Image (cartoon, rainbow, N blue to C red):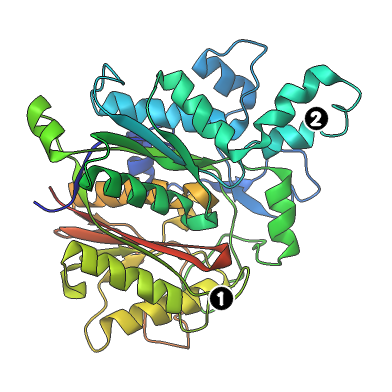
Amino acid sequence: MKGVAITGMGIISAIGNSVEENYISLIENKIGVSEIQNISTIHANVIKVGEIKKTNEELIAALQLNDSNNFSRTAMIGTLAAKQAVQNAGITSINEFRTGLISATSVGGMDMTEKYYYDYFEKPELVKYITCHDGGDVAEKIAEELGLKGMVTTISTACSSAANSIMLGARLIKTGKLDRVIVGGADALAKFTINGFKTLMILSDDYNKPFDNNRKGLNLGEAAAYLVLESDDLVAKQNKKVLARVSGYGNANDAFHQTASSENGDGAFLAMKKAFEVSGLQPSQIDYINVHGTATPNNDLSEGRAINRIYGEEKVPDFSSTKPFTGHTLAAAAAIEAVYSVLAIQNNVVYPNLNFETQMEEFDLKPQTTLKNKNIEHVLSNSFGFGGNCSTLIFSKS
């Protein structure tokens, strides 16, 4: 059994408030992309998003926070997901072993900054909301709510952030630095990100269509997901159930453009290549690829070409993007898709790539469009971010 053990998972997204709810939505084609309800924005009736249908007040109540709290929405959904993961792993004493938290985010506390920026100069009591703008504040708040005293750090490499969180956690365990690590990421929707992506002209005014020839762009989403990684020694000592394993990982940078991926997918190709080297697996052993699949013209072309470069003359395995269900959840994307990858292994399913109609003209690749049952031993999951940050994870049956 190669790789690092996954012993717990937690998630909240537009398609469910738990691992079970997310899985049911995936296999029953229940999408979470809809019109904006929780944010007051001029784009509310123009674009669609993958929104968690819980207000901040409902999240505060769920976490039993006091009225004077300064939790951003990102911190709240992150805390909920992390608590689920710890409970799922059967952890009752968080500091009993060398335990760390590696949390990924891009948005951080932007929602708080937007709300209080214009007033806090005159009202010093509002400064506490501005201080939570920092992405590191999310990890600190999660750790505080978990009672974690060990290593706490934040990773922010755009849309590959959570993949790099998982990769770093696995490396810390493999090198004996920690016994277990809570890894993942969280990002909430905010006006800043909606306006920013609108400016980039990569938002769709309809449901996103990954790997479709007529794709128009992405739908933003919000979500949080965390996994508990544990060493084999700890698993054996506590007789823990292993959900799956992180068997491979790799990251690279194609150093091509601030926001675009290189046309030939150089960074994506290198990330996948490195992940295979770490895992010792061959591309032919992958049963399902959870593609990054953002439905932007640039990403799907670049990622498709990179996959073709990896497989050459070999047949490309079943692949699909789950972003039509959730929207693109930025720094949380790799974490929620890690949960989906583990669920695919546990339940032997390939999820459908919703909304697909027309094959891309640049290559002969067609995603899986219906739910498919087959034996799944290994899943490859891609996550590529702005700044050329490309990361790949491989998950394997325990």
**Which amino acid does the dot numbered 2 rest on?**
Tyr
Quadrant housing residue 286: bottom left
When asked about the image quadrant of residue 252, the answer is bottom left
| Mark with earlier residue (1, 2) | 2
Task: Pinpoint residue 196: horizontal percent, then vertical percent.
Answer: 72, 56
Q: Residue at x 62, y 44 (%)?
A: 107
Q: Which residue occupies 58% across, 62% down? A: 218
Q: Residue furthest top?
A: 66
Residue position for label 1: 298
What amino acid type is highlighted by mark number 1?
Asn
Can you tell which quarter of the image residue 181 is in? top left
Residue 115 located left or right of residue 388: right
Q: Is residue 11 above or below residue 364?
A: above
Residue 339, position in %: x, y? 33, 45
Circle 1 crowding by C-alpha within 10 Å: few under 14, some 14–19, many from 20? some
Q: Give how far apart the Cα atoms at labels 1 and 2 are.
A: 36 Å
Q: Nearer the viewer, residue 153 or 120?
A: 153
Percent position of residue 177, x then y:
27, 39
Q: Is residue 138 left or right of residue 99?
A: right
Q: Which residue is mark 2?
A: 116
